[in-house]
Each structure stands twice: as C-alpha cells, then as structure tokens.
C-alpha cells in the first residue's frame, strides 16, 4: 500500500482548519484557564471515536488513536494557551477577550492537532501502533508540561517517540527548521529585590537609594556575556522588568528587577546564574543596599534526538523539498524540553513569515500573526513523521 498524500489531505481541510484557528484566536484563554479551548478539543477527539482523557494537568486533553495492529506509541503534542497581551491588529477575527491574545500561534497549533487527528483517524486500519494526541495547557512559563507529566501523560501508554512543532514568524513561509541536538535554550526566570532606605528626594544623603543601585546592577549584568563567557558559547541575560518608586521626590525603599537567562548548556547556565547573584549582591552592597535573588521558573533546553529528527527531516524533505529545510535554532525556550528529557523526540519549526502580508512581527508582539498556509505544512510534515513510525509498510 502506498502512503497517503498527507499534504493533499491537509490542503483539503484547509478552510476548516483556518476556521478553527480563527475561532480559537477570537477566544484566547490564559494558561490553565483553557476551558473553552480544551472543551472543543476533547469533544472533537471524542467525536472522532478516540478514547479521550480530560483534565490531564488541569486543562490538558489526551486522545488515543489505536491502530489496527500493534506497534510503537507516537506522541504528538500541541499547546493551547494564549498570553496576557492586548491585541493591536485590526483583523476581523481579533481577540474578543480584552488583555488576552494568541500572540504565539498556539491557536494554530491546536487547530493543526485537531486536523491531524481527523486525518489520521481515516487511516486507523493501516496504522501499526498508537497515536497519542496531547493538547497541553499553560506552555507560556506556567508549567503546563510539568502538570501533564505529573498527571501521567508519559505513561499508559508510554510514548516511544514524541513530536512537537511551532509556527515560526522568524522563518519564511515554505521553509522549515529541522536539526538534531539542542534547538531551544534552557531558560530561567529570576527576580532581584534591592532593599535600600527610603527618604526625601531633596535629602538623598539621608537615604540609601535602591534605584541607583538597581540601575548599576542592570548595567553590570550586561558584562557577564561579554566578559565572563567564552565567545564561542551562546548565552543571553535580559532584564525585562524594573519597578520602583511612586513619585518624583521620594526615594523609595526598594527596587525590583525581573529577568531571564537563556543558554543551550547547563554548566554555562549555572555559571551565568552564579555571576548574576554575585554581581547583584556585591553591587547592592557598594551602594549600601541589600540584594536578594529569587528563581521564579526554570525550563530545560529542548534537545532533539537523532532518529526522530531523521524521521522529521525525511518528512520535511518529502513535503516541502530538501532545499527548504533550514539548520537553525533559537534562544527562545519551551517546556516541551521536559517531555523530551523523558522521551526521545523532535521539535521543529514551521515557517509562517510573510512580509508582504505583514506577517513578520515577532512572537509575543501585539500585532503578531502568521501565514495560515503554514498550518498545512505543519500537519503534513508531522503526519509523515508519525507515519515513519506507524505506517512503515506504506512507504
Ligand atoms: Zn510564546
Ligand atoms: Zn509558543
């Protein structure tokens, strides 16, 4: 038997898939609050005749598609959550939920997952193995992968291989990024509280100004990458939040910084973290203040295993042409890293950028959008990658 033409199958469902994506886009939900979204997901999977588990990791959903014959268990994971961002685009399907927006493309991922489920169900009698469709909540720094793992998503049945993907606006439509090894960075989020002594803005000598100390800390931290890190290695230190004070003539009691470290290498990550702590504490002391550092979140790097990456590479070459496969990685991070620490797999990126249509805003931007034709590419590549495991006889 020859393998189904999954690209054609996905293309045939394009209108439905776009309608689904736009519906999710209009009704975005924050992490662990994806009640409407996960309800639609669970009902759709159940409607396809799958065994469905709801409430895995709070709002997560798992659907099992058992093939006609035994074989490997292939997990495919899609994230469902939106971000606390006010959408600024004027598209007709803009967010109807003030302050919440699908600014990362997870609306597309959810639509792709359901479309894949629809397609693969048709071929149930040709499948040797099990397809495990995993719809994850709270990917955006809230620990959704952890919650699902804690609820047993990687057991009963345990996946032999796992795939996940991201629509990517840093990559042009028609291209796909596939590579083995680390593809997304490990990330940690920290806060630094600088405790000083408040006072009158006109009498700074009687106060210990935490704003001045924190400003020096921000500047000093930028020397860690340039002065403490081997130039051959990649690491990022960013401070994204600086809050202090209430008005112009009062020196406040404390200042608060929040930032993130990104790297592909755990040792380098720890070393960078140690330097941040040393600098913050000692710099604060120099200004007669005190600094306390706290870790708010840690996400593992996403590491792709050799064999599943080859399966995705072959799938991408088949669907999109080998010349459209890019060997690139990113300093962004993803909690899929935790699942891939347990199960070998491949995380890949599907190009969704289209400058002519204005789809080139970065992820998490209030005007973020992507070329929806990327949804077809993503479905077709993942279907073929899965088929490399469960439809081996239909080469
Ligand atoms: Zn994101
Ligand atoms: Zn994302």
Image (cartoon, rainbow, N blue to C red):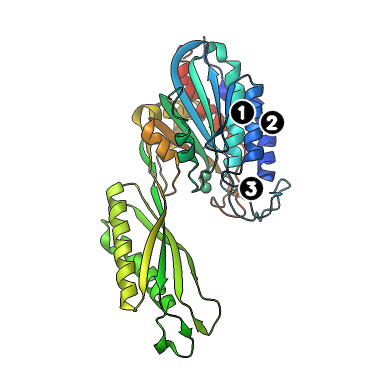
> Which residue ends up furthest to the right in the rendered image?
92
Under circle 1, the secondary element is: helix
- Mark 1 or mark 2, which has the lower sequence index? 2
Looking at mark 3, is its residue's CB closer than 8 Å to ligand 2?
A: no
**Side of 3 where 367 appears, left or right:** right
**For residue 273, what is the image quadrant?**
bottom left
Would residue 233 be visible to someone looking at this image? no
Please tell me whether mark 1 or mark 3 is closer to you in this view.
Answer: 1
**For residue 327, what is the image quadrant?**
top left
Q: CA distance from mark 1 to mark 2?
A: 8 Å
Residue 118, placed above or below residue 102:
above
Q: Which residue is mark 1?
A: 115
State the image coordinates of residue 218 (x, y, percent, origin top left).
Answer: 39, 69
**Side of 132 where 358 appears, left or right:** right
| 8, 344: nearer the viewer | 344
Would residue 379 be visible to someone looking at this image? yes
- Give residue 283's mark: none
Q: Which residue is mark 3?
A: 357
Say if mark 1 contacts mark 2, CB within 8 Å. Answer: yes
Q: CA distance from mark 1 to mark 3?
A: 25 Å
- Mark 2 or mark 3, which has the lower sequence index? 2
Q: CA distance from mark 2 to mark 3?
A: 21 Å
State the image coordinates of residue 39 (x, y, percent, origin top left).
Answer: 65, 34
- Mark 1 or mark 3, which has the lower sequence index? 1
**Side of 364 where 338 appears, left or right:** left
State the image coordinates of residue 32 (x, y, percent, origin top left).
Answer: 57, 43
State the image coordinates of residue 342 (x, y, percent, origin top left).
Answer: 37, 32
| 30, 376: nearer the viewer | 30
Q: Which residue is mark 2?
A: 16
């Amino acid at each position: 038997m020859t393998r189904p033409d999954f690209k054609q199958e996905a293309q045939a469902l394009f209108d439905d898939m776009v309608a689904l994506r736009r519906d999710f886009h209009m009704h975005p939900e924050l992490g662990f609050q994806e009640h409407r979204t996960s309800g639609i997901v669970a009902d759709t999977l159940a409607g396809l005749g799958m065994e469905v588990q709801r409430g895995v990791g709070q709002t997560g959903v798992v659907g099992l598609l058992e093939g006609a014959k035994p074989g490997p268990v292939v997990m495919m994971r899609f994230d469902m959550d939106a971000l606390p961002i006010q959408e600024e685009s004027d598209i007709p399907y803009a967010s109807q939920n003030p302050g919440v927006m699908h600014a990362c493309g997870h609306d597309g991922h959810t639509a792709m997952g359901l479309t894949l489920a629809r397609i693969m169900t048709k071929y149930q009698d040709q499948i040797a193995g099990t397809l495990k469709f995993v719809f994850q909540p709270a990917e955006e720094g809230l620990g959704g992968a952890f919650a699902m793992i804690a609820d047993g998503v990687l057991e009963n049945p345990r996946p032999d291989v796992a795939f996940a993907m991201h629509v990517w606006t840093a990559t042009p439509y028609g291209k796909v990024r596939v590579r083995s090894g680390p593809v997304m960075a490990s990330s940690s989020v920290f806060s630094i509280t600088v405790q000083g002594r408040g006072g009158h803005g006109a009498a700074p000598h009687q106060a210990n100004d935490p704003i001045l100390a924190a400003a020096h800390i921000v500047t000093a931290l930028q020397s860690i990458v340039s002065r403490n890190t081997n130039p051959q290695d990649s690491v990022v230190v960013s401070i994204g939040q600086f809050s202090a004070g209430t008005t112009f003539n009062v020196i406040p009691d404390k200042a608060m910084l929040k930032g993130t470290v990104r790297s592909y290498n755990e040792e380098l990550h720890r070393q960078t973290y140690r330097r941040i702590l040393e600098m913050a504490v000692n710099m604060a002391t120099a200004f007669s203040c005190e600094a306390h550092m706290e870790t708010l979140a840690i996400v593992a790097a996403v590491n792709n295993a050799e064999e599943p990456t080859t399966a995705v590479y072959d799938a991408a070459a088949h669907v999109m042409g080998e010349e459209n496969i890019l060997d690139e990685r990113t300093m962004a991070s993803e909690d899929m890293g935790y699942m891939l620490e347990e199960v070998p797999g491949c995380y890949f990126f599907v190009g969704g950028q289209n400058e002519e249509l204005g789809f080139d805003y970065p992820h998490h931007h209030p005007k973020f959008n992507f070329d929806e034709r990327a949804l077809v590419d993503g479905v077709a590549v993942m279907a073929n990658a899965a088929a490399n495991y469960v439809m081996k006889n239909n080469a």
